[in-house]
Amino acid sequence: MSAQLFEKILIANRGEIAVRIINACRLLKIPTLAIYSSADKNALHVTLADEAVEIGPPAPRESYLAVEKIIQAANENSCDAIHPGYGFLAENPALPQACENAGIVFIGPPAGAMELLGNKIASRIKMADAGVPLIPGMKAAGSDIRQFEQAAAKAGYPVLIKAAAGGGGKGMRVVHEPDNLGPSIEAAKREAVKAFGDDTIYLEKFIESPRHIEFQVLADNHGHTVHLFERECSIQRRHQKIIEETPSVALTPEIRKKMGAAAVKVAEAAGYRNAGTVEFLFDKSGQFYFLEMNTRVQVEHPITEMVTGADLVVEQIKIAAGEKISGYIHTIEQRGHAIECRIYAEDAENDFLPSSGEILYYEEPVGPGIRVDSGVSLGAVVGVDYDPILAKLIVYAPDRELAIAKMINALTDYKILGIKTSKKFMIDVLAHPEFRAGRTFTNFIETNMPERKTDGNSVAEIGAAALSALLAGKPEGKTSAPKSVYLSPWQMIGQWEISSRIT
């Protein structure tokens, strides 16, 4: 690689993924332009980028989802490429199409492939024709209750109603008996149109207690499509992943080979380019079924990087610039074990509701095999306008047992005060005997932790926050509670003062 790949890349995102992209661009010596809403003017990604421009008010539709504003910012600031990250516009065909119209490179798949794979019904039909294993169910959308009744009877109860344009568990209903089919269809349609503006739904067999396993794929413009092995993402809450690991303990070498080949077949059938993830459900009998393809870099991509040595964001950028997949990618192997925990600003003891406020103390864990992809720092204000993910904690070890131990230690050492986070909940998951035994299924939390309760912040963490306040020189009597869902550390420890005694 001799010449610079791009003149400047606009990052159409925020938070930790924007920071991750900035770091990849630095490796490639490509300048970056961050966009931000008025709520994010002091955000970490804004301070780290080479340049930054305000794009609009906090409401996503007026800022991070405003395609015209983003294209205008790229043109006005001499950006010849846009990286969407994940979320927001990352899987909206309108952005790659707008980029193409404006002569800007979109760092992701073509709009046509994104549109195909974003519709679950259209993609099911395409993959059925390509010979990819599918979950039994409807081949097309249903408009009549009798179609659903016939499909449910053929597949066998329980069945799953799904939104064709859906994701994140929205527009989804599990039906266990025929009497509940009609009401569940109507409820799913109402939720789907509210979330996606499209009430198209279909039905498939509900796979009970499956594993959620996905394969990372890369495809360039020179006819090369490869996979970089699997990630298991079975630990979920409200259909959202919270802990991921690789390799999966459930896959034999033979099944891994078959699933990898199927993932490549999915990408090729869709005419896919750039980085993407093919998701499968894996049942207890050892059968796997195509679920969907995510047309972007995944939140959990770092664990693949840890066990393969690949840099997936760098590969994304190089592929978008017209280069071939790097030669080393074709010979990589899985080595060791990696786990990722998503650090959310949420209250795990209160139905995972979002938490907001100012980060009063922040300390990341350090050590061999520990990586933190963070979008926040000390003093950051966490609002409720956007997804509550703050950071991702990733560990690597020679085997799974050591990786679990390392992750528990790293989570314990990760200090974030001022808002509630999900880290203690994840410690409980990792320490659970069923997780340690590798019996990880998508209903793990409901089955094994239905009434979990924990205490609040540890004494050590509260003391650390107090020390941080002392060093910051906050005078006695001048402290105030941040706008968060619980009392600040200073309120919990009462009055304090700086002593002149040396002990």
Image (spheres, helix red, strand yellow):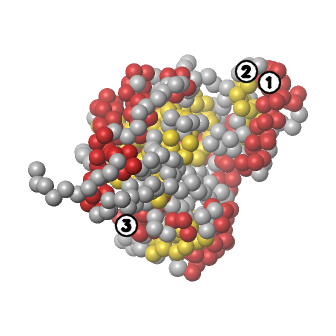
Disc 2 vs disc 3: which is toward the camera? Answer: 2
Name the amino acid, label 2: His
Tell me which corner region of the image, top left, top right, bottom left or bottom right, holds residue 19.
bottom left
Q: Which residue is mark 1?
A: 180
Q: Nearer the viewer, residue 58 or 112?
A: 58
- Is label 1 in contact with label 2 (beta carbons under 8 Å)? yes
Q: What quarter of the picture does the N terminus occupy?
A: bottom left
Q: Compared with residue 394, is residue 282 higher up or lower down, i.e. above or below?
A: above
The residue at which mark 2 appears reads as 176
Q: Determine the residue positioned at 26% across, 56% down.
A: 497
Q: CA distance from mark 1 to mark 2?
A: 7 Å
Q: Position of residue 138 (x, y in %)?
A: 77, 32
Name the secondary structure under disc 3: helix
Q: Identify which amino acid the numbered label 1 is placed on.
A: Asn
Q: Which residue appears at 53% of the width and 68% of the height?
A: 36
Is residue 470 rendered to the left or right of residue 133? Answer: left
Q: CA distance from mark 2 to mark 3?
A: 52 Å
The residue that label 3 is drawn on is 26
Circle 1: is it few (<14), some (14-19), or many (20+) Cα within 10 Å? few
Q: Quadrant of residue 150?
A: top right
What amino acid is at disc 3? Arg
- Tell me residue 86's x, y (percent): 54, 54
Q: Earlier in the sequence, mark 2 or mark 3?
A: 3
84 lies above or below 438: below
Determine contact: label 2, label 3, CB under 8 Å.
no
Q: Position of residue 331 (x, y in %)?
A: 37, 45
